[in-house]
Image (cartoon, rainbow, N blue to C red):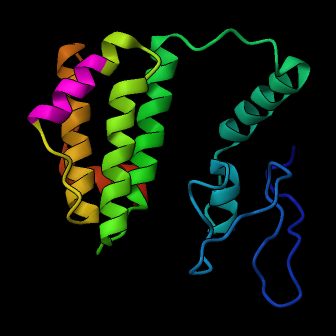
Amino acid sequence: MSATPEIQTTNKTLKPIVGVSGRTIVYDKDGKPCRACNTLLDFQMATGKKPKSDQINQTSLVNKAIEKDEYRQDPPDVEVLGKSSWTFMHSLCAKYPENPSPKDKNQISTFFDMLGRMYPCDWCAEDFSQYLKDNKVDTSSNDGLNMWLCGAHNAVNVKLGKKEFDCQLWKKRWRDGWE
């Protein structure tokens, strides 16, 4: 894998269509590279940022390991499941509309209610259900929902003895990036 891949572009634009990873670059409805839909390296390439060489080497090693035997993995433990779940929830909520419709509000509330009932870790599910009873989901806006979710995540972090995240930084961490 090369740090400077040949950039394939469409005829209509100068946007890259294939990234460093060999995957097609996915663009959102505004024509910007979608951060959640692309690998970090592909996103950096598509936005003109230079990936660090150690990122390319690490990604190459991970891709080779996955290609070797991608299906022979153990089911996720609580740490893998938790990290993956929080990543998904924060990424999902980052895309929540600024001015949500009644349908949006109902669906996101239903989503969190379902997590509290069906999360694979029974203890976590019960704990989250209790959090939902004590702290109603803020469906009023994108910022309201994300601040609520950050509070929920921090409540878990406290129980696990982990550092709390500064919720004022949620947009940088989960939507816009740090630069």
> 79 left or right of 69?
left
Which residue: 30% across, 61% down?
A: 105
Q: Residue at x 61, y 62 (%)?
A: 49
Dividing the picture into quadrants, the one containing residue 36 is bottom right
Location of residue 1 in the rendering, given as x and y in whole percent from the top left corner: 87, 43
- Examine the structure image and report whether residue 130 is included in the region drawn in magenta: yes
Q: Is residue 175 magenta?
A: no
In the image, taking residue 153 as reference, residue 73 lies left or right, namely right
- Whether residue 178 is visible, yes or no, is no
Q: Is residue 26 above or below residue 123?
A: below
Q: How many marks?
A: 0
- Location of residue 50 (image quadrant): bottom right
Residue at the spot 45% in from the left edge and 15% down from the top edge = 79
Q: Residue furthest bottom?
A: 12
Residue drawn at the location 32% of the way across and 57% of the way down: 106
In the depicted view, which residue is nearer to us: 2 or 175? 175
Q: Is residue 167 above or below residue 175?
A: above
| Residue 145 pos. (x, y %) | 25, 54
Choose between 28 and 11: the one closer to the eye. Answer: 28
Q: Magenta: predominant secondary structure element? A: helix
Query: For this view, does 45 lie left or right of residue 137?
Result: right
The quarter of the rendered structure image containing the C terminus is bottom left
Q: Position of residue 126 (x, y in %)?
A: 27, 18
Evaluate whether residue 23 shows in this view.
yes
Where does the image place residue 39, in percent across and percent down from the top left? 67, 49
Magenta range is 126-134
> In the image, is residue 157 above or below residue 143?
above
